[in-house]
Image: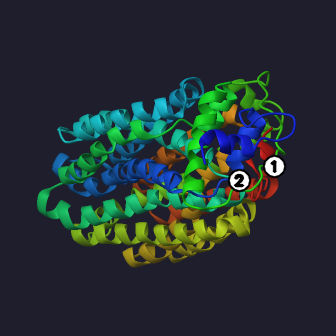
Amino acid sequence: MSTQAIASDYAVAGGTASTPDALLARLERLPITRRLKAIRVIVGLSTFFDAYTIIAIAFALPQLTQEWGLTPAFVGLIIAASYVGQLCGALFFGSLAEKIGRIGVLRITIIMFVLMDAACLFAWNGWSILIIRFLQGVGIGAEVPVASAYINEFVGAKKRGRFFLLYEVIFPIGMMFAGLVGYFLVPIYGWKVMFLIGLVPSALTVPLRWLMPESPRWLASKGRLKEADSVVSTLESEVIRRGMTLTEPEITAPAVQKAAPEGVKALFGGIYKSRTFMLWGLWLTVYSVNNGMITWFPTLYKTWFNLSLDTSLAYGWITSSCGVVASVICALMIDRVGRKRWYTWAFLLAIVPLITLSVLGAKSAVEILILGSLTYAILQTIAFSLYLYAAELYPTRLRAIGTAYSSAWLRAGSSIGPLMVGFIVSGFGIRFVFVIFAVIALIGGLITWFFAIETKGKSLEELSP
């Protein structure tokens, strides 16, 4: 069956298959095809190494601390530098993605990411690695929110949570892989191997970005209906070739509103104002705790508890692995449980091991390993799935910029967390870190309880007109 025939067969009353309403309806009813899975893999490969690079510094720092004589406070600055860069990248490129499209930005960011990863190999002191990590963070900060908006815009409501989170689970897997590399190779080859391992495979993904189509939802929102129709028709043709059945598209979403407000100001108007501030609170709280722990734990094991480098890195890897297991469980269950219920319980449950650590005094590395890993695993289910939730709460005209601006608070939290740990450990002791983290988790739970909305089972257009 030809593409034209498919389009004709699924025309609906009052319009053709190439109208905005019909295009979105056709997209909603599509099954998960091989092409969609390929898109997820291509973007996922870069996301894997984004995550790897973010956490690689945690496994390089125990050695760098001794080699360059870094203080705990300066270590916190190095960790925070990447997240400040991510903040800048998310804000600038999130806006750019609404103007030039998702693919245009994703091609720029992968090149930036690879170049800065190579630059890390030539760092010679604390300030040089700090500056390079900041610039690398700009590329990573741009990549992740735009990629999240891009993937969400291809999938229908009933399959969106599971499909997207099975992509997002690549992020904690990348972190876990960084732990393996750190444990087995850093003691033998030195800290530079962390960045070398991440450079080569990520560079190979660069040409694959030019094989991916533009988001049909973004094309339709810009009035480029012929191009959007071509993308959707290609996906439909694959379904027909595989002998699968396409159901009749049902138009339930309103037409694309060309006159609707766009840009940053629109994030603070109408129904989106409360959503924006709610998302900011969730990103800030969960990442202040989780990245504060995961990036500092290996260094704490080495410098505070005097464990060997091998043991310190192994403990860090165990924590990352717990996050991966929890993330997979969340990906398989989130469409049934719902976002709001899951997040509320996760925040509140995470308080228990944090308070336990503070009461026990966090006097041993094993206590931190067990209870810290439990906390990290619980909160990681929120952290890795917030890109899904944020993309669901904004319309196509605001999705990339809304996700970017809300996830900017991820960068803020990821900067605050490591700095907080460094200063509190130096001035007051470890136990007080976990008291502060418990309070932050409680705030996140209350924000979710009072202000979050449920999104499961609803189309993007139904959620965000």
- Say above or below: 339 vs 225: below
Are the residues tagged 2 and 1 within 8 Å (C-beta)?
Answer: yes
Label 2 is placed on what type of residue?
Arg
Residue 103, horizontal then vertical, whole percent:
49, 34
Please indicate, yes or no, whether residue 30 appears anywhere in the rendered image.
yes
Q: Nearer the viewer, residue 147 or 350?
A: 147
- Say above or below: 188 vs 100: below
- Say above or below: 227 vs 288: above
Q: Which callout, 2 or 1, points at the residue further toward the start of the chain?
A: 2
Residue 246, horizontal then vertical, whole percent:
69, 56
Q: Residue furthest top?
A: 259
Q: Residue at x 53, y 35 (%)?
A: 214
> Callout 1: 10 Å neighbours few (<14), some, many (20+)?
some
Q: Residue furthest left?
A: 188
- Secondary structure under badge 2? loop
Indicate which disc residue 250 carries: 1
Q: Residue at x 16, y 50 (%)?
A: 67
Which corner quadrant of the image does residue 239 belong to?
bottom right
Q: Pointer 2: what residue?
A: 29
- The answer to whether 79 appears left or right of 287 in the picture is left
- The answer to whether 426 appears left or right of 263 in the picture is left
> Callout 2: 10 Å neighbours few (<14), some, many (20+)?
some
Q: Residue at x 26, y 71 (%)?
A: 307
